[in-house]
Image: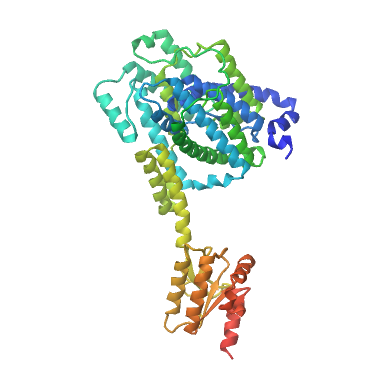
């Protein structure tokens, strides 16, 4: 591959059109109004100082602009990753521990995610994103949204809760409210900001709702001295840019960090491929999955080296950039540059930003994550997948974020195996007025041929379902009167493994002993080649393989007529 293919930013710079510059500039400034408050809020969601959210935003935007293939995809701190980062970092930091240790752990986590993403790209492992099916992903995200919402309510009400897990946090919040720990002024600021965000997003979507709410909260806090009335504020941010830092963590920390990095990598990859696919269609680009992984990996590596934490694609920020007219990744570069200028020239700009307002920003994000209509659709369309989604939701809600992702993956994989273990199978008949042979469940009046059974098995024939196939055939063989031929319409059978081959050999011998022939029709050439390789034609008559079901039926009639 050429340098331009490995480093798409080189090609983007060479092909850049001056006419795009005004749109990219405007989109970059608009994007900054979202990046700053969300970056700070999501850093706190991850249990980290707000300033780390800005460091992370800057570095990941610059790195993705160089290595990312999409022209408009926006990376950054993400609400879906925040609880996962906190679930990994906070248990390793003792209560009241040094924030610098939390930052170091989060930075090492970002480096691990970056390394995993890069290795996955090198070995072309993008298919792992498919380990999260849509129903389980839906349940996981809904559980995550509820976890975020409950976790932020105490901050919105002006107090804190020392609890672990959704149930404990809910109980702690209820006790805090009942004990009178609510700070009325803090609740007014937070709830008011949340209301502004929700109303503007609903009725005036083109207005930067988060920016309006944050600016209003800062003004109210400054004018009325709310910091002296019990409202926690962010305070003055450190000035300037962090130095290049290799995070230092203990060997004993690496196990939990690696497990967390694996879960974050999977969620980030799934989200990125989904978002990239959505916006690629709008911009006329193709999704390059492996290069996307390199782009995300580079973004995480860059963030991890400058006191940042793991990042992912943001669908909401990408949509803002797209609507603002973004044409290239210069939009992200401008956003990163603008944030850098704020840190260098005006670090005190956000000193009176109330913590309840940051909680409101996170709660608004959690509400946008939740997809209750999607759950209702699953209930109406397919109850089994609704059950999987509900189980994934409960996994996150009851077990926690990291165990929840493991539950979601396990459910997705088990659902695949369930379909392979017990695939759809049916007999075929010939209905009047319709060409060919069809499912007798759909055409119960379809003609069946005496002495002949047409059977269809809709799955690859492998170890997991070999016994199911055998029992189905044996059941057909025990009919009264018994059939002379059992013809397997084998077009849906895309594979036969060695376990299934041994089963077929034994099954054919049993059927032959009863005077019944096992016949195959419409078997695909690659599968037929495996039949020869397994030497199954030692027992199954080579003449009992037909190109079509009609040919098999005609041969049956011909032999019976002799």
Residue at image point 38% right, 11% down:
227
Coloured how? rainbow
In the image shown, does 150 or 370 lie closer to the viewer? 150
Quadrant of the image for the N terminus? top right
In the image, taking residue 164 as reference, residue 86 lies left or right, namely right
In the image shown, does 22 or 532 lie closer to the viewer? 532
Quadrant of the image for the C terminus? bottom right
Q: Position of residue 170 (x, y in %)?
A: 31, 32
Q: How many marks?
A: 0
| Extreme-front residue of the structure | 251
| Extreme-left residue of the structure | 179
Residue at image point 54% right, 11% down:
346
Placement of 150 over or under 399, stated as above or below: above
Placement of 6 over or under 217, stated as above or below: below
Q: Position of residue 19 (x, y in %)?
A: 73, 26
In the image, taking residue 63 as reference, residue 512 lies left or right, namely left
Residue at image point 54% right, 31% down:
111
In the image, taking residue 206 as reference, residue 472 lies left or right, namely left
Q: Position of residue 79 (x, y in %)?
A: 47, 31
Residue at image point 63% right, 41% down:
122
In the image, taking residue 450 as reference, residue 555 lies left or right, namely right
Placement of 156 over or under 397, stated as above or below: above
Quadrant position of residue 72: top right
User: Is any atom of residue 446 visible in this view?
Assistant: no
In the image shown, does 121 or 140 lie closer to the viewer? 121
Q: Position of residue 406 (x, y in %)?
A: 43, 43
User: Is any atom of residue 406 visible in this view?
Assistant: yes
């Amino acid at each position: 591959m050429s340098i331009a293919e490995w480093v798409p930013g080189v090609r983007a710079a060479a092909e850049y059109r001056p006419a795009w510059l005004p749109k990219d500039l405007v989109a970059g400034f608009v994007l900054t109004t979202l990046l700053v408050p969300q970056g700070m809020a999501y850093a706190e969601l991850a249990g980290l100082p707000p300033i780390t959210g800005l460091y992370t935003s800057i570095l990941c935007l610059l790195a993705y602009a160089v290595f990312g293939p999409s022209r408009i995809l926006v990376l950054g701190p993400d609400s879906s990753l925040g609880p996962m980062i906190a679930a990994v970092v906070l248990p390793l930091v003792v209560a009241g521990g040094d924030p610098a240790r939390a930052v170091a752990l989060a930075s090492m986590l970002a480096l691990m995610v970056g390394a995993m993403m890069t290795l996955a790209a090198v070995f072309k492992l993008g298919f792992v994103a498919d380990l999260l099916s849509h129903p389980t992903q839906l349940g996981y995200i809904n559980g995550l949204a509820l976890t975020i919402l409950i976790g932020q309510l105490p901050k919105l009400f002006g107090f804190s809760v020392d609890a672990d897990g959704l149930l404990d946090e809910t109980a702690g919040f209820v006790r805090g409210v009942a004990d009178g720990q609510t700070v009325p002024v803090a609740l007014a600021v937070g709830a008011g900001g949340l209301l502004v965000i929700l109303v503007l997003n609903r009725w005036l979507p083109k207005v930067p709702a988060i920016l309006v709410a944050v600016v209003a909260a800062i003004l109210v806090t400054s004018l009325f001295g709310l910091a002296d009335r019990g409202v926690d504020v962010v305070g003055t941010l450190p000035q300037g840019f962090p130095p290049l830092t290799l995070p230092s963590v203990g060997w004993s920390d690496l196990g939990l960090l690696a497990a967390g990095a694996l879960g974050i990598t999977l969620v980030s990859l799934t989200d990125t491929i989904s978002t990239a696919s959505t916006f690629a269609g709008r911009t006329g680009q193709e999704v390059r999955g492996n290069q996307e992984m390199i782009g995300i990996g580079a973004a995480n590596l860059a963030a991890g080296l400058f006191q940042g934490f793991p990042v992912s694609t943001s669908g909401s920020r990408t949509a803002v950039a797209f609507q603002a007219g973004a044409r290239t990744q210069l939009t992200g570069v401008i956003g990163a540059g603008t944030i850098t200028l704020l840190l260098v020239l005006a670090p005190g700009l956000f000193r009176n930003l109330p913590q309840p307002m940051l909680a409101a920003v996170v709660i608004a994000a959690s509400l946008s994550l939740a997809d209750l209509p999607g759950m209702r659709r699953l209930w109406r369309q397919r109850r089994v997948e609704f059950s999987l989604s509900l189980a994934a939701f409960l996994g996150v809600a009851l077990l926690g974020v990291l165990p929840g992702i493991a539950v979601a993956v396990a459910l997705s994989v088990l659902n695949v195996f369930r379909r392979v273990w017990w695939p759809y199978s049916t007999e075929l008949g010939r209905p009047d007025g319709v060409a060919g042979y069809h499912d007798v469940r759909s055409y119960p009046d379809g003609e069946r041929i005496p002495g002949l059974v047409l059977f269809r098995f809709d799955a690859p024939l492998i170890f997991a379902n070999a016994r199911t196939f055998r029992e189905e055939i044996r059941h057909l063989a025990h009919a009264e009167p018994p059939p002379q031929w059992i013809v397997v319409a084998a077009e849906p059978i895309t594979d036969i493994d060695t376990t299934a081959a041994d089963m077929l050999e034994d099954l054919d011998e049993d059927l032959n002993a009863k005077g019944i022939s096992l016949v195959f029709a419409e078997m695909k050439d690659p599968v037929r080649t495996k039949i020869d390789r397994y030497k199954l034609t030692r027992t199954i008559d080579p003449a009992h393989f037909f190109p079509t079901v009609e040919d098999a039926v005609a041969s049956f009639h011909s032999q019976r007529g002799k």
